[in-house]
Image: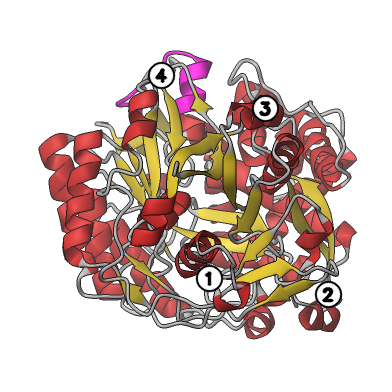
């Protein structure tokens, strides 16, 4: 009897640049098949005909299938609507084909059964439900009640579901990499440079309200050390370039340090993997520091170490079930990382319950005060279907209002003809939508002018010498630009605001292109900085009336301007009436000293000059995010 054809769908997109074509291996689906195929019954009954991993036209993809018995779909925010469209096409061609939807974007209710092309839903971890479902279907008269974590449509059209189950141990769970699940896929696409999700453990002990990682409330379980080491060897042999570490808390176990060392040794020996992103643990700063040192020292770390707050408001933290580091400890950690040359950045989330416009802006100011000048990222809060905040009780408690907004992927816009959506939090009982838009504008603007250091020296001087809070300076600057729409700052602020409003309204706004820098739409902080450096002299000239209201040293603006890297900017030596290098060095070292009135000559140099604006965008703006790559080197020159 011929085997039944299975297809698994975990679509992403091709990332195409002038230098390479990259895509993610469909790890989640690969892991499901690696586990399910351990069963003799599954192996004898089914064959994995194909792993679908790209967003090709749904009708064309469905037509390519050959007598599918069952198609499984892994759903997340970037592919759920595509999965629905493909399942619909499959049902048209093969009405008897069964469809299974699982993943983070499958909601906790049975609303997906409103779609006639969905037959089964899987809750939580998928390995056990998927294998048991295949075994029951192979038995002839399936008993769906025997499948943990499964939801199905009953004869009367209603949903019925079983309690989820998770693997008690991962020690003997086979690897999709090592069992050859991806071999034929990689052989069929030699043009692709591969990335992949990678797990060394699974589970999270924390219950942050905006996250669904702790949903299963299971203890953290580890894959075997031998599996991990063998997978690292596989990555080197297959020349896998980027690993997205899916551990919720890498560094939580002692063994994570030798894992990091094994990665570093592999790269030193073979050149692969090129980089890895990890979510660091919160419980052992010493071990995390050592791991970050290993990864950074071998140029493996993509963005450095994360010291996240999510919010600087105690009320917000209480609402979301988080406890942050105290400020003194945060400063000491940052000081230590910087002394070792390790990048560290801090994340904030806009829209959390209890946050206000004022507290959000103050959060930026507080982080600057603590010394986190270039490494701040912030994200809009989007409700994950299975997170605590998305559930009715918490939505009602905090008056959380959401709106489905289009998922944007500028580098692959043509592949998103089928729109994907996120549930954006647009208001709460402490923040109106209008305040949220003002907070968005503030955050993206200060990332552009402070994070990229365009006005950082001026803001630092005003805070440390005149006691003017960072958020006050930038709020006043935004008000100045709003009152002077004819300036380059005024027009840019209008575009940032219009873009955010268009996103909220799901309308098209295409004025965030800077063809001199890049061919794709830019993120708003990049757009802000890019616009101002493209019009560098005009920006500072139009800023003069605003800065005149402050008692600035006459040559401070000149020092700020001289620090900035620009294409083909020659090295130069300039005189100053104050010892700016010593002052700013002391601030960055978190040991601020008074600004000394002392004449100095400063030599500004660029050890890696950029030749043109396209190169500038790639190296300084895009790759230099969360770093100080926009700054030249400032050193004392001889008298």
In this rendering, the label closer to the viewer, 1 or 2: 1
- Name the quadrant of the C terminus: top left
- Name the quadrant of the N terminus: top left
Up-down relation of residue 81 to residue 219 (above or below): above
Q: Mark 1 or mark 4: which comes first in sequence?
A: 4
Residue at the disc numbered 1: 213
Residue at the disc numbered 3: 57
Q: Which residues are magenta?
A: 601-618
Query: Outermost residue, left direction?
Result: 269
Q: Is residue 401 magenta?
A: no
In this rendering, the label closer to the viewer, 3 or 2: 3
Separation of marks 4 and 2 at Cα, in angstroms: 46 Å
Q: Assess disc 4: are there few (<14), some (14-19) or many (≥20) residues with their C-alpha within 10 Å of its C-alpha.
A: few
Residue at the disc numbered 2: 430
Q: Mark 4 or mark 3: which comes first in sequence?
A: 4
Q: Assess disc 2: are there few (<14), some (14-19) or many (≥20) residues with their C-alpha within 10 Å of its C-alpha.
A: some
Q: Quadrant of residue 490?
A: top right
Q: Secondary structure at mark 4?
A: loop
Separation of marks 1 and 2 at Cα, in angstroms: 26 Å
Which residue: 53% across, 64% down? Answer: 133
Q: Mark 3 or mark 2: which comes first in sequence?
A: 3
Separation of marks 3 and 2 at Cα, in angstroms: 43 Å
**What is the image's colouring?**
secondary structure
Q: Secondary structure at mark 2?
A: loop
Q: Secondary structure at mark 1?
A: loop
Residue at the disc numbered 4: 19
Q: Position of residue 515 (x, y in %)?
A: 65, 16
Up-down relation of residue 473 to residue 233 (above or below): below
Q: Quadrant of residue 40?
A: bottom left
């Amino acid at each position: 009897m011929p085997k039944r054809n299975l297809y698994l769908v975990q679509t992403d997109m091709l990332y195409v640049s002038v230098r390479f074509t990259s895509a993610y291996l469909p790890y989640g689906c690969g892991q499901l098949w690696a586990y399910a195929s351990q069963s003799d019954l599954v192996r004898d009954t089914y064959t994995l005909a194909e792993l679908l991993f790209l967003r090709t036209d749904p009708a064309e993809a469905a037509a390519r299938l050959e007598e599918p018995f069952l198609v499984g779909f892994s759903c997340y925010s970037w592919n759920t609507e595509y999965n629905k469209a493909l399942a619909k096409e499959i049902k048209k061609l093969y009405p008897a084909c069964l469809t299974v939807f699982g993943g983070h974007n499958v909601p906790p209710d049975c609303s997906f059964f409103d779609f006639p092309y969905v037959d089964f839903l899987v809750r939580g971890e998928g390995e056990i439900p998927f294998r048991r479902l295949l075994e029951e279907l192979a038995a002839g008269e399936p008993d769906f009640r025997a499948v943990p974590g499964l939801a199905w449509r009953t004869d009367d059209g209603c949903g019925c579901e079983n309690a989820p189950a998770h693997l008690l141990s991962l020690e003997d769970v086979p690897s999709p990499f090592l069992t050859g699940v991806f071999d034929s896929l990689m052989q069929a696409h030699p043009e692709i440079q591969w990335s992949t999700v990678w797990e060394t453990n699974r589970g999270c002990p924390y219950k942050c309200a905006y996250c669904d990682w702790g949903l299963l409330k299971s203890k953290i379980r580890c894959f075997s050390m031998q599996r991990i080491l063998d997978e690292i060897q596989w990555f080197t042999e297959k020349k896998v370039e980027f690993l997205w570490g899916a551990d919720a808390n890498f560094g939580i176990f002692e063994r994570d340090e030798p894992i990091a060392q094994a990665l570093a040794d592999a790269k030193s020996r073979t050149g692969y993997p090129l980089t890895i992103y990890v979510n660091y643990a919160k419980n052992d700063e010493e071990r995390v520091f050592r791991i970050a040192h290993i990864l950074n020292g071998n140029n493996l770390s993509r963005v450095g170490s994360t010291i996240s707050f999510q919010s600087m408001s105690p009320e917000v933290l209480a609402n979301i079930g988080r406890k942050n580091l105290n400020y003194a400890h945060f400063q000491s950690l940052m000081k230590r990382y910087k002394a070792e040359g390790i990048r560290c950045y801090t994340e904030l989330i806009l829209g959390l319950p209890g946050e206000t416009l004022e507290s959000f802006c103050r959060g930026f100011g507080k982080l600057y005060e603590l010394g986190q000048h270039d490494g701040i990222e912030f994200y809009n809060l989007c409700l994950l279907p299975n997170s605590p905040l998305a559930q009715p009780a918490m939505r009602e408690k905090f008056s959380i209002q959401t709106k489905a907004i289009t998922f944007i992927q500028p580098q692959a816009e043509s592949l998103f003809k089928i729109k994907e959506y996120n549930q954006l939090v647009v208001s709460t009982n402490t923040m109106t939508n209008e305040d949220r838009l003002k907070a968005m504008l503030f955050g993206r603007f200060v990332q552009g002018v402070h994070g990229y250091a365009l006005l950082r020296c001026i803001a630092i001087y005003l805070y440390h010498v005149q006691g003017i809070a960072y958020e006050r300076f930038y709020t006043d600057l935004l008000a100045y630009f709003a009152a002077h729409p004819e300036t380059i700052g005024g027009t840019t602020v209008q575009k940032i605001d219009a873009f955010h409003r268009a996103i909220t309204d799901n309308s098209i706004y295409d004025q965030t292109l800077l063809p001199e820098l890049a061919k794709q739409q830019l993120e708003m902080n990049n757009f802000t900085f890019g616009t101002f450096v493209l019009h560098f002299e005009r920006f500072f000239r139009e800023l003069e009336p605003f800065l005149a209201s402050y008692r600035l040293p006459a040559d401070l603006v000149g020092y700020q301007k001289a620090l900035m890297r620009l294409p083909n900017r020659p090295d130069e030596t300039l005189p100053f009436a104050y010892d700016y290098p010593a002052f700013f060095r002391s601030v960055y070292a978190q040991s601020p000293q008074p600004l000394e009135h002392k004449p100095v000559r400063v030599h500004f140099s660029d050890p890696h000059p950029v030749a043109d604006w396209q190169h500038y965008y790639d190296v300084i703006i895009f790759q230099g995010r969360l770093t100080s790559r926009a700054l030249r080197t400032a050193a004392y020159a001889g008298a």
